[in-house]
Amino acid sequence: MFSYWEKKHFFHCDLAVVGSGFVGLSTAIHYKKKHPKARVLVLERGVFPNGASTKNAGFACFGSLTEILDDFWQMTQEEVLELVEKRYKGLLQIRKNFGDKALGYKHTHGFELIDEQLLQAMDQMEEVNKLLKKIFNKEVFSKVKKPEKLGFSEKIKVIVENKFEGELDPGMYMDSLWEMAEKLGIRILTGVSVLEIMKDEGRILAESNSGKDSMEFVAEKVAICTNAFTKKLWPESDLVPGRGLILLSKPLDFEIPWKGTFHLDKGYVYFRKVDGRLLLGGARNKDFEGEKSTDFTVNPKIKSHLEKLASDIIFPGKEIQWEMEWTGIMAFGPKKSPLIRQVGKKTVAAVRLGGMGVAIGWEVGRELSGLLRKM
Ligand SMILES: Cc1cc2nc3c(=O)[nH]c(=O)nc-3n(C[C@H](O)[C@H](O)[C@H](O)COP(=O)(O)OP(=O)(O)OC[C@H]3O[C@@H](n4cnc5c(N)ncnc54)[C@H](O)[C@@H]3O)c2cc1C
């Protein structure tokens, strides 16, 4: 039950953004910067954003060598280069806007472990470097000189280094977005699940998480930024959810002989050091069908695959004690690029961020804000 005052003041706005992940908050911020007087409201169903933005691995990356080579099978050369450039520039933009300190950003470089099966990728490294020179002006991928010093399994034949990548703390990135949103006067309402959007009228039906309160918001413009959970609000959207699992070890009782962000298995598996622990995640490719889910549960098949990788490949012969595990949900589609478009007279959407939202979320928000301003 709402009061006269609540009804009078809290249910109308100029822009309502649904979803408070990287894309939702970035959209709200870009829009509010251009329209300081606009009343901007963000509606989020979780207490914290409950999708991928605070569940991810914090890789500030744009694609490993084998991932880029894989992309050449599905996209044109121009499309691949465009995507890499978009991701790289996106990373530079968030570093510029928030600062490395606020993001917990460390420029520790990216690495890819190459086993026998992927070894032939090395024949194409120079060619890929040549193509990427247009964007980076320098060589991106190089072979690590003494890979055996890093202590990985002997199955790892080569390690490829990428000097342009780094890592950040997703919680600190979210905190920076919250702080900026707050400074600009953006309202974020949490615990509000949007049930339906009337896209031509800007009407939004929602309920509180307890399910006790039904609400109707009316907005001049609406932005759908619900990524993997978009089908409910925009059933025609071309995307499928993809769950990701992360395991975090207990603090390790030995010195980790490497730093940086590491990829395995064409980028499907990733790991890094976090506060003296091993963070290890991914392996969605071990059960693609099972992972097409918006349910935040843990797939035991994937969990045991990751655990095995830890003691076979990453720290051979060592027993790793795990302390935490969690899942987050991404969204994928036929193309690797996000879906950004107008979906009604008063409604736009930016969804399907794949596994690269850290790099592109901010710029996707800028693009969506541009679309809103043209409406
Ligand atoms: C395990 C994992 C690891 C990853 N690692 C990396 C990485 O290292 N580097 C990288 O670049 N990317 C990584 N990603 C991908 C990255 O996290 C995502 O691309 C990015 O967070 C997507 O941001 P978003 O704002 O589009 O979506 P989300 O963060 O999912 O935000 C959508 C929001 O909408 C809300 N919502 C949904 N439906 C409703 C509704 N009906 N009403 C109200 N609110 C709603 C959700 O609660 C959620 O908060 C990873 C993802 C996962 C899951």
Image: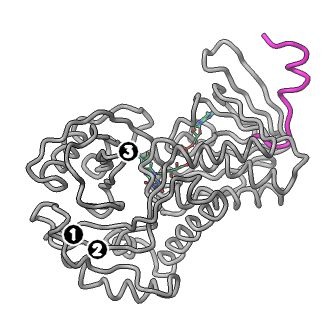
- Mark with earlier residue (3, 2): 2
* Quarter that holds the N terminus: top right
Q: Disc 3 beta carbon < 8 A from ligand 1?
A: yes
Name the residue beneath numbered marker 3. Answer: 244
| Residue position for label 2 | 160
Q: Which residues are magenta?
A: 1-16
Query: Which amino acid type corresponds to the residue marked 3 in the rendered image?
Result: Gly
Kind of residue at badge 2? Val
Is residue 36 within the magenta segment? no
Q: Which residue is mark 1?
A: 114
Q: Position of residue 11 (x, y in %)?
A: 83, 28
Q: Is residue 102 above or below residue 93?
A: above
Q: Could you tell me which secondary element the residue under label 3 belongs to?
A: strand
Using the rendered image of the protein, determine whether residue 288 is visible from the camera's viewpoint. no
In terms of secondary structure, where does tag 1 sit? strand
Q: Residue at x 32, y 34 (%)?
A: 324
Sequence-wise first label, 1 or 3: 1
**Between marks 1 and 2, how big is the CA–CA gap?**
8 Å
Which numbered mark, 1 or 2, is in the foreground of this view?
2
Left or right, 150 with respect to 343, comes to left
3 or 2: mark nearer the eye: 2
Question: x and y percent of residue 4 in the render?
Answer: 90, 14
